[in-house]
Every structure is written in structure tokens, then in C-alpha cells.
Amino acid sequence: MTLSTMARRGDDHANVAVRPPYLFLGAIGVGAALDYVWPVPMFPDGLQLAVGLPLIAAGIVIMAAAMRRFRRAGTSVPTGLPTRTLVKSGPYRYSRNPIYAALALIHAGIGFGADSVWVLAMLLPVLPLIRWGVVAREERYLMDKFGDEYRRYRDAVPRWF
């Protein structure tokens, strides 16, 4: 499908199964609810934040850098909007999906920081949903839209870090 065909049909976007931030937030919410009903502590007091805060901080830094690259390139971050250019600089030199990796780090950091096995456990179903319901669709979209340029990028940069 060509770019002009996508634009005319109004489907110049990845058509992902679910918006990734909502998926992570929903999973954290389910984990928090389960933790409220059936708490399962993991760490002695004080260790939770020592483990959780660095993960959250790393996730925020990676996400901010990735989003800044999108804005500088003049392309949109939300998955339901068109991608105008292929971003290959900043964190995208090391990972094709730094925002999703950052969201996973933040999710894990919240789980550790809250000392919640359930919040951490909810990350397990989220990761394959991100991989197959979001990333796979984005990869097909980018391949259709950017062709060989995306193929070269895909072959040179790993999906994750």
C-alpha cells in the first residue's frame, strides 16, 4: 500500500490493538487492586524505593529523550497518528522501541517501589501484548510506509535494548 493510498483512506497509522500507556496503566491498576485484596510483600522496609526509584528514573529519562527526538523530527508520538519520518537518532540508535522499554521500566519500578508482587506480575501479560498487539503492527506499518529505509534500520538496530 502506498503512502498516498493510506492518507486517502485515513489509515496512515499503525492501527495498534491498544494504546500502550493505557495498557501499562490498566495493568498497574489491576495489580494494585490485587495487592489491596491480597498483599504479598517482597522486600524488607526501605529496600523497595532503593530498587524502584532508579527504575522509574531510568524509564522517565529514556522516555523523555525518545519523545524529544520525535518532536524534533516533526513526527507524532501517539500510535493513532501518522508517522512523518523515521527517527533513528537518540535512544533510537540503540532500540527501535525505547518508549515501550521505558514504560516497562517505569511499570517495574512502580511494582518494586510499592513492594507489590501483583503489580510486577501484571507486567508479564503486558509484554507479549505490546510485542504482538503494538510493535508487530507498527513494524508492518513502518515497512509499508518507509520500505528499504525501515528495513535497513530494522536490520541494524535491535527491537529492544
Image (spheres, helix red, strand yellow):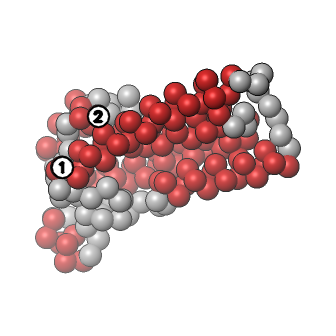
> Residue at coordinates 83% horizontally, 40% vertically from top-left?
39
Coordinates of residue 29 in the picture (x, y in percent) = 67, 53
Q: Secondary structure at mark 2?
A: helix
- The dot on residue 127 is none
- Is residue 8 depicted above or below 28 in this figure? below
Q: Residue at x 19, y 72 (%)?
A: 7
Vertical placement of 116 versus 132: above or below?
Answer: above
In screen coordinates, is 29 left or right of 22?
right
Residue sitting nearer the eye, 116 or 92: 116
Q: Which residue is mark 2?
A: 91
Tell me where residue 37 appears, x and y as whole percent.
85, 49
Occupied quadrant, residue 43:
top right
Q: Quadrant of the C terminus?
A: top left
Is any atom of residue 120 visible in this view? no
Q: Secondary structure beneath disc 1?
A: helix
Q: Seen from this angle, which residue lies furthest right?
A: 38
The kind of residue tagged 1 is Arg
Residue 127 at x, y percent in the picture: 54, 42
Task: Give residue 109's quadrant in the image.
Answer: top right
Q: Nearer the viewer, residue 46 or 108?
A: 46
x and y, in percent, of residue 73 in the image? 16, 50
* Quadrant where the image shows the N terminus: bottom left
Horizontal arrangement in the rendering, residue 18 relative to residue 61 (left or right): right
The residue wearing badge 1 is 72
Amino acid marked by disc 2: Pro
Disc count in the image? 2
Q: Identify the residue at horizontal 72%, vertical 48% (top origin).
A: 32
Mark 2, residues whose alpha carbon is within 10 Å: few (<14), some, or many (≥20)? many
